[in-house]
Amino acid sequence: MEQIKSRRFKKRWDSYRKNPLSLTLFILVNLSAILTIGILLILVGYILIKGIPNLSLDLFAWQYNSENVSMMPAIINTVIITLLSLIIAVPLGIFSAIYLVEYAKRGNKFVGAVRITAETLSGIPSIVYGLFGYLLFVIACGFTMSILAGALTLAIMVLPIILRTTEEALKAVPDSYREGSFGLGAGRLRTVFKIVLPSAIPGILSGIILSIGRIVGETAALIYTSGTVAEIPNSLFSSGRTLSVHMYALLSEGLYTTQAYATAVVLLIMVIGINALSGFLAKKITMR
């Protein structure tokens, strides 16, 4: 094994000596990977070092007050808004992608316009979505600053992400799968839901994971739509803050900096846990 490895290393080194550009690109790629991983580890380590010592049971009290600065209402609001946003955005994004890939004619100008629009909407700053949600849902629809207004705004925000990732996942399914299903007498609808969608589930779940990360970490869009009330909502029309908004409020006040770091730890653990659970489910579904 060692001899084989040494031979491979010599071959690579000889190729790099003959082509200095390849060696330069190899060094740049590895330096970029090391730099990216290093920055990530520094950020995570800084949050953990600053936040873990400040975690206490008072931060998980059921009701928020100026003494305990509990994040429990924010955790509950985060879960509610995330689930409600996904319930709205996931079916719309998946069904839209199915139409664009499976039913619309190839080369259709409408399909091209939808794709360009989705890519453009993905790059719009979140504060613009917040102002849009404020004007539409809070003022025009009369929802006031509420959980429902915030969830609808975030659903619009993540819809392009789900649509584009689902579309690419459906395109990655080989046409032979569809042709084999059609050859066995299955219709288009049965082929899509029995053959194509199960094969594209890992890619669809990756888009949902990205959407969850953006929903959980969103602040600007929710300040104008769901509000900053630190209470557990009585209904979907009640105002409430999420974990990210809770952390922003604590830091902006300047009185609860240590509690804000503790909130960042909980938020980080929540995002990692959601991603790990989604990845586990994707592997299970793929194995089946």
Image (tube, helix red, strand yellow):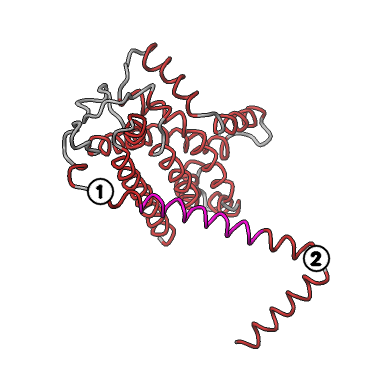
Residue 248 vertical position relative to residue 44 in the rendered view, above or below: above
Residue 187 in the figure: left or right of residue 108 = left
Residue 55's disc number: 1
- Residue type, mark 1 in image: Leu
Whether residue 30 appears in magenta in the rendering, the answer is yes
Residue 20's disc number: 2
Q: What is the magenta segment's predominant secondary structure? A: helix
Residue 152 x, y percent position in the rendering: 38, 26
Quadrant of the drawing holding the N terminus: bottom right
Q: Nearer the viewer, residue 153 or 270?
A: 270
- Residue type, mark 2 in image: Pro
Q: Nearer the viewer, residue 269 or 288?
A: 269
At a point 63% along the width and 34% down the height, the residue shown is 105
SS label for mark 2: helix
Quadrant of the drawing holding the C terminus: bottom left
Q: Which residues are magenta?
A: 29-49
Q: Residue furthest right?
A: 18
